[in-house]
């Protein structure tokens, strides 16, 4: 059993910063096992968390002044909610860690306190049946644990999932980092193929899906993330559509209209696809819901994108041959 404290050092803050911007994503982990915080006794509480450093540090820093145990599961460096959805923060892993740490010999009581967002992956009934330990789900946020322990229960406020603007903004650096190199490569390529306007369009579509979308998420109509992203993609494409329409080299109205609308056909699917990635970053969706949305909308996005590319090629050939 290892001993930890509740202090967050500069090295921890640096680790959190790297994790937030998506650098060395799989490397922000702590060793699974049982940790002692303060001077716990056989009667002290046992909190369960993931081996993702941000989750582990959020928990231990919230337990300042308490004598307790922290049982860390092997979730492959994934946070509580996502690990519960993936099954790594699950019933079997909780039972396995109870056995490997020989927890029944460490504490006299038989109660584990798990984070609320792990409830989708853990069956309290099965844990009790197979290990003898009762599962109690604590508050949503680690910072509410002291009040939860003092009152002996979680209030409605402690249980409420808000996912407000601050929570959504935290996701943006990771999303941008994941698409940064492809975005730059695409922007450079289209610059040589179609000029600066196309480059700006690429950057706009990508940043709309990774940065603007999480900011505007609650206010964009429709329920599905994909359709929300598609609507946003069309909105950010409107200035490009207008610029191309009024500056088109074609004299025929319908050709001007088609030429301009290809921007919406190319930008909207890109923004929508990137917005779809946020289904796994919020507590608004379920694993089955994400799967259903992917199978429902990905073919549509591909069709729209292919049509946009095809029209662009046709228009390019039309201009090249001198037709108008």
Image (tube, grey):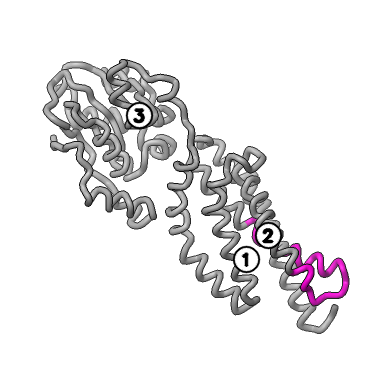
The disc placed on residue 179 is: none
The quarter of the picture where residue 51 lies is top left
- The answer to which of marks 1 and 3 sits earlier in the sequence is 3
Residue 49 vs residue 109: left or right?
Answer: right
Q: Do the residues labelled 1 and 2 touch (CB within 8 Å)?
A: yes
Q: Residue at x 40, y 35 (%)?
A: 84
Circle 1 sits on which residue?
A: 201
Residue topped by disc 2: 237
Q: Do the residues labelled 1 and 3 touch (CB within 8 Å)?
A: no
Q: Which of marks 1 and 2 is nearer the N terminus?
A: 1
- Element carrying mark 3: loop
Q: Residue 115 carries which label?
A: 3
Q: Does the magenta stretch include residue 310?
A: no
| Left or right of 136 in this view: 32 | left
Residue at figure coordinates x 18%, y 21% from the top left: 44
In the rendering, at what x and y percent does residue 20 appear?
Answer: 37, 51
Q: Residue pushed farthest right? A: 252
Q: Residues within 10 Å of mark 1 (few under 14, many from 20)?
A: many
Secondary structure beneath label 1: helix
The stretch drawn in magenta includes residue 248: yes
**306, above or below 28, in the image:** below
Query: In front: 186, or 167?
Result: 167
* Apparent side of residue 46 relative to residue 159 in the rendered image (left or right): left
The kind of secondary structure element at disc 2 is helix
Name the residue: 53% across, 47% down: 214
**Part of the protein shown in magenta:** 244-269
Q: In which quarter of the image is the C terminus?
A: bottom right
Instruction: Tell me the CA gap for discs 3 and 2.
Output: 42 Å
């Amino acid at each position: 059993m290892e001993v930890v404290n509740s202090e967050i050092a500069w090295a921890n803050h640096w680790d959190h910063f790297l994790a937030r911007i998506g650098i060395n994503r799989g490397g922000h982990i702590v060793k699974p096992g049982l940790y002692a915080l303060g001077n716990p006794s056989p009667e002290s509480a046992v909190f369960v968390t993931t081996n993702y450093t941000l989750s582990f540090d959020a928990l231990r820093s919230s337990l300042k002044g308490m004598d307790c145990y922290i049982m860390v599961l092997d979730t492959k460096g994934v946070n509580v909610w996502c690990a519960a959805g993936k099954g790594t923060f699950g019933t079997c892993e909780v039972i396995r860690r109870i056995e490997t740490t020989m927890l029944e010999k460490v504490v006299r009581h038989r109660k584990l306190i798990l984070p609320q967002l792990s409830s989708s992956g853990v069956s309290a009934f099965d844990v009790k049946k197979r290990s003898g330990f009762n599962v109690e789900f604590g508050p949503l946020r680690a910072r509410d644990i002291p009040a939860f322990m003092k009152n002996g229960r979680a209030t409605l406020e402690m249980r409420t999932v808000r996912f407000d603007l601050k929570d959504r903004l935290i996701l943006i650096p990771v999303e941008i980092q994941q698409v940064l190199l492809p975005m730059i490569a695409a922007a450079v390529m289209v610059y040589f193929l179609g000029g600066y306007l196309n480059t700006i369009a690429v950057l706009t579509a990508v940043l709309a899906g990774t940065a603007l979308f999480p900011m505007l998420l609650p206010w964009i109509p429709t329920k599905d993330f994909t359709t929300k992203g598609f609507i946003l993609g069309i909105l950010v494409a409107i200035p490009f559509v207008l610029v191309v329409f009024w500056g088109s080299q074609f004299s025929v109205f319908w050709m001007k209209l088609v030429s301009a609308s290809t921007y919406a056909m190319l930008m909207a699917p890109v923004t929508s696809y990137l917005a779809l990635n946020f289904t796994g970053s919020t507590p608004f969706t379920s694993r089955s819901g994400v799967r259903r949305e992917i199978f429902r909308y990905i073919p549509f996005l591909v069709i729209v994108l292919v049509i946009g590319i095809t029209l662009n090629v046709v228009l390019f050939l039309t201009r090249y041959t001198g037709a108008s």
